[in-house]
């Protein structure tokens, strides 16, 4: 039960995962109760029979018109002349001769800045910060990242005989399937499909995703569809499919991750006005990333206005 849940969330082998960095409560229960399962039961008993006032919220929450809404609203808040699209940063260095501290170089541009928030995947941060601090760059390179593939299958609801009485399922390694899990997207989130359609989102992660490099998209879709048909008993053909590749986009919180992040933090402190943000450090979920960005902004604010 644990392997597909934990491995699915972090797209990795749970044997190599840092419990302290991913599920600290489990570690706490292990020490406190001598067993994670016993600890879970104990914690559940604390709330048994209690009534709670206020509104009830589902565990699964999203924005009504999709997560793109968040980016669109942020875009409207930012001055137009402060955004530079399709401009890859090649190097960050200290600007010793000018008033502003950092020099940001691209292929055909150069920008000077007093403060810098680097919110890239750790491998890209390592690459562009190498000139600024080779040791910081080396530590950032130690955070490995896995790949993932998502495939959205759209079906006519009337052609599916499975009741879809849940939010989805995960697939243990011992089942020897290609897919790691499936989310019943149109069940989990209202408004994701017309009432006569169903959206099933399949995920392939970890070593399985890495092994797909030699396959074409149609081959990947057919293999994933075969697993889906086998598990849910689907005989219908999908109306449409949308496949997305996420290469090296899933940070692997390996053993000793917290110690590594602390080393990185200490080296960043050597440069006033520099902060890091993103999913590589203290959480991979959307709320974690938002918190990371908030913390980074507050840190920069303290540096200049304390």
Image: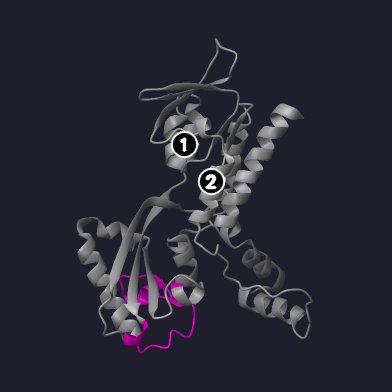
Is residue 94 inside the magenta stretch?
no
Is residue 158 inside the magenta stretch?
yes
x 38%, y 78%: residue? 197
Residue, disc 2: 278
Instruction: Find out whether the residues at labels 1 and 2 contact each other: C-beta distance under 8 Å.
Output: yes
Q: Residue furthest top?
A: 97
- 273 vs 207, left or right, is right
Residue 254 in sight: no
Query: Viewer-proximal residue, 217 or 257?
Result: 217
**Residue 35, above or below 70:** below
Q: Quadrant of the C terminus?
A: top right
* Residue 158 location (% of width, % of height): 35, 87
Which circle's residue, 1 or 2, is located before the other in the chain? 1
Residue 15 in sight: yes
Query: Viewer-proximal residue, 305 or 264?
Result: 305
* Residue 292 location (% of width, % of height): 60, 47
x 59%, y 63%: residue? 23
Residue 116, quarter of the rendered image: top right
Colour scheme: one colour
User: How many numbered discs, if any?
Assistant: 2
Residue 235, quarter of the rendered image: bottom left
Residues rendered magenta in the picture:
157-185
């Amino acid at each position: 039960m644990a392997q597909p849940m934990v491995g699915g969330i972090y797209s990795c082998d749970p044997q190599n995962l840092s419990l302290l960095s991913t599920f600290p409560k489990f570690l706490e229960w292990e020490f406190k109760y001598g067993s994670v399962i016993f600890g879970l039961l104990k914690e559940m008993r604390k709330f048994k029979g209690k009534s709670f006032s206020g509104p009830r919220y589902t565990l699964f929450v999203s924005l009504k018109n999709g997560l793109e809404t968040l980016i669109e609203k942020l875009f409207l808040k930012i001055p137009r002349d402060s955004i530079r699209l399709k401009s890859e940063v090649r190097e960050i260095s200290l600007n010793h001769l000018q008033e502003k501290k950092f020099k940001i170089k691209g292929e055909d541009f150069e920008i000077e800045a007093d403060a810098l928030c680097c919110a890239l995947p750790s491998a890209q941060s390592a690459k562009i910060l190498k000139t600024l601090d080779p040791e910081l760059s080396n530590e950032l390179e130690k955070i490995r990242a896995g790949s993932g593939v998502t495939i959205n299958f759209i079906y006519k609801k009337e052609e599916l005989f499975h009741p879809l009485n849940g939010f989805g399922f995960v697939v243990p390694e011992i089942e020897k399937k290609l897919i790691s899990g499936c989310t019943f997207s149109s069940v989990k989130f209202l408004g994701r499909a017309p009432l006569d359609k169903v959206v099933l989102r399949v995920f392939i992660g970890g070593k399985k995703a890495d092994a797909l490099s030699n396959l074409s998209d149609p081959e990947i879709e057919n293999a994933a569809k075969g697993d889906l048909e086998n598990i849910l008993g689907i005989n219908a053909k999908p109306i449409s499919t949308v496949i997305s590749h996420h290469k090296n986009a899933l940070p692997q919180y390996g053993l000793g991750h917290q110690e590594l992040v602390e080393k990185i933090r200490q080296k960043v402190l050597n440069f006033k006005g520099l902060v890091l943000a993103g999913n590589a450090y203290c959480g991979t979920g959307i709320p974690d990333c938002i918190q990371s960005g908030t913390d980074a902004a507050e840190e920069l604010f303290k540096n200049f206005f304390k």
